[in-house]
Image: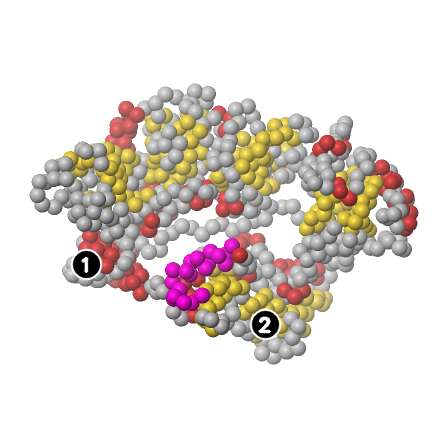
Amino acid sequence: MTAYRCRNERRLAAVRDHATLNGIDFLEVLDHDAPAGVEPQRTLIVRFVKPIPALTEDNVRLHGGERVPVHVVWAARADAVASPPATPEDAALAGGIAQGDRVLVVRTDSAGDYSTYRLALATSAADDAPPRSLGFDPVLSEVAFSFKVECESAFDCGGDRTCPVHGSPPPLIDYLAKDYEGFRRLMLDRITTLLPEWSDRNPADLGVTMVEMLAAVADRISYAQDAIATESTLQTARDRVSVRRHARLLDYRLGEGCNARAWVCFEVGAAAPPVLAAGTTILPASADDVRVQIRPQDLDEVLAAGRPVVFETMRPVRLAPAHNRIEFHPWSDADCCLPAGATSATLVVEPGFALAPGDFVLFEEEISPVTGTAGDADPTRRHVVRLSSVEVTTDPLDATPVAEIAWPARDALPFPLCVTASVPVDGGREVRPVCVARGNVALADHGRTVVEPLVPAQAPVSGVYRPRLARSPVASTSPLDRSSATAASETDARAALPAASIRGDDGTLWRPAADLMSSGRFTPEFVVDPGGDGRAAIRFGDGLNGRAPTPGATFTATYRIGNGSAGNVGAETLGRVVLGGGGITGVRNPLPARGGTDPESIERARIRAPVAFRRPERAVTAADYAAIAERSPEVQRAGARIRWTGSWHTAFVTVDRAGGGGVDHAFAGRMAANLEPYRMAGRDVRVVNAVAVALDIELLVCVDDSVVAADVQRRLLDELGSGPLPGGRLGMFHPDNLTLGRPVYLSAIVETAMREPGVVWARAIRFERFGSDVDERGAGVIAAAPLEILRCDNDPSFPERGVLAIRMQGGA
């Protein structure tokens, strides 16, 4: 009989030594040792650290079960089991348990399935919270177990608590760069991301020389591909304004780029202001100027000396010294780890702690969990989240004030994060915090705000008024989405508008617009037309589309300078803040700036504008519905069928959702809303699941005598499984590898088995659809219909989702 224990042994030992706290020591599932008259796998024996009060079935909850939900029939302390509700055999069994006042006997209504269940203590039938009033520790008030513990298995029953290794995300590279400056900027940005410490941009530098040489070669190749002619057509136009207007006739908007965004973390002292205002200027660190704070009156001198990249905070941020460094609370665990996908954690509360929902928090690895040194900390283990809830409470073990924080699923950890670890210290080992949380985090974007008159500042009495902005480039910003940190840091160059406004001498405030085609005759809007020389021209309305400026009126512009990929600075680049007073002792950007996009080149517009014009904006055929559905990032592939349903035609759109997710009500609603603008009148749309076809596969694998057959079998089940693999790879039958109409080839399965070290040969014993009598081994392929998805989950609880059996021959 296997005992299911709490994985936190340090917590268990601490509760055992505590004067009053009690908790679950271990749980046993009575199976093969069940005496006559007692049904196996339906009796749970729960042993506690100390004697327990008279608990009943109202104090026990059973959670879990993928197929078979399990309920508690009765529960009683072992020395108080009576008949009824228990049987005489149950009473005899409980009477033979030693220290019965520490044991809770639980009878269930079924034996469950093969999944993991969780037994939890509750305060009462109406309150699922842990029974703190009865002296139970909240951490040791539940335990995970399986009803099938004594089922035969060739594998080690011990669990693996090591953090999984995930592959690095692909680099953010713009593969559509078309000219010398684009290629040069692209390579310099990539080098800055990989080597943040290299900031030399001297043309005599060897690295810059190599970059410029490669950019010149790339520009020559790009120039040879482009046609140069006149301004009469889109394909031959040279001037940017001409191309922009040609593209607009094709319902295509020429992108003017977007500024970058960066997370900025402040370290503050007691004299720091309680709130840092929006628009605060952030500058890169400088070896010649070690000041953290720059006085506002010195800003022009600093900008003239080095011409640094300038960022400004987008929203006010609250500052507090207690938020400089916040430790995680590991609940007495020596090797605590937040798994990938985590959306909650526990922080230690220090005096002055004031985090609240809506605040941004940085998680970062402070020391290496292997060596224990700060120099070996992984700089990629950094992540910013937006808090959705903050609940301050205490640890009942030692009364430590803690805060339970949570963040949206969009901000879920993309990698596992070790909180504490046992690291080498002075010849021994010591448990130390590996990762910490930091508050005082603000989102800043690239660009410096200036206020100056238009050139010329006064509208003429007669004629067209086409003034210019004195400086360039004008920053373009996309709307800020504060629903999550991930959404806030993302930019959309297509939705970006110039960060500019114009105020007339009569007090009217003019706002930027993408174009004036939908502007009313009294709407104060203008368009920024960047010219080929880099200077931006202002185009007001004519009194029909957009309000016309009053003759003789003067105008002052407030706009921001700084745009494009120049703002994609590397991590730890920013280091100074422009602020009067004092109190800020440190400024840094722990993550690289992202989202900076250069203005779209004329060459790219020539390529994309005609394609955009041909893009169908209506759904007539079944293929149209499928193509429009596949535009969603949530859809891997789609198919459609149009059928007469008795009163009208209905387009049934079959969707293969990315990640293997099903078509639930919420997803179907989103997809139907996306398709609504394109459907024909009188035609209905329904989004449905694909037809899942389970496979039945059995392999016979012969292995060399020098390897352990069970080890090879486990690795083959992983490689041919439906889950993720180390390094970011996916198993052969992962949902993202199978889609609508994609067949499964026997040769690919055998090839995967033969690649495993130690495998001598492999052949298929069974290769067919589940429940079918048609053997597909001769054909070597199981075909799928256009709206079918083959699957082989190999889940013993759901054999109808596919079965994969591997029989081993030979081996040690």
- Residue 360 in percent (x, y) is at 47, 36
- Please name the amino acid that badge 1 sits on: Ala
Residue at image location 82% in from the left, 55% down from the top? 40
In the image, residue 202 above or below residue 19: below
Q: Is 248 left or right of 652, judged from the image as shown? A: left
Is the residue marked by circle 1 packed among few (<14), some (14-19), or many (20+) residues within 10 Å? Answer: many
Residue at image location 39% in from the left, 44% down from the top? 594
Colour style of the rendered protein structure: secondary structure
In the image, residue 732 above or below residue 86: below
Question: Could you tell me how far apart the alpha carbons at marks 1 and 2 are, in whole angstroms?
Answer: 55 Å
Q: Residue furthest left?
A: 462
Q: Residue furthest front?
A: 647
Residue at image location 45% in from the left, 27% down from the top? 319
Q: Is residue 35 magenta?
A: no
Residue denoted by label 1: 237
Residue denoted by label 2: 746
Residue at image location 28% in from the left, 57% down from the top? 252
- Residue 46 in percent (x, y) is at 79, 43
On the image, which quarter does residue 269 sit in? top left
- Please name the amino acid that badge 2 sits on: Leu
Q: Secondary structure at mark 2?
A: helix
Q: Is residue 671 magenta?
A: yes
In the image, residue 312 above or below residue 408: above
**Residue 173 visible in the snapshot:** yes
Q: Is 638 left or right of 426, judged from the image as shown? A: left
- Which badge, 1 or 2, comes first in the chain's sequence? 1
Range of residues picked out in magenta: 666-684
**Residue 364 visible in the snapshot:** no
- Residue 204 in percent (x, y) is at 27, 42
Q: Is 576 left or right of 689, judged from the image as shown? A: left
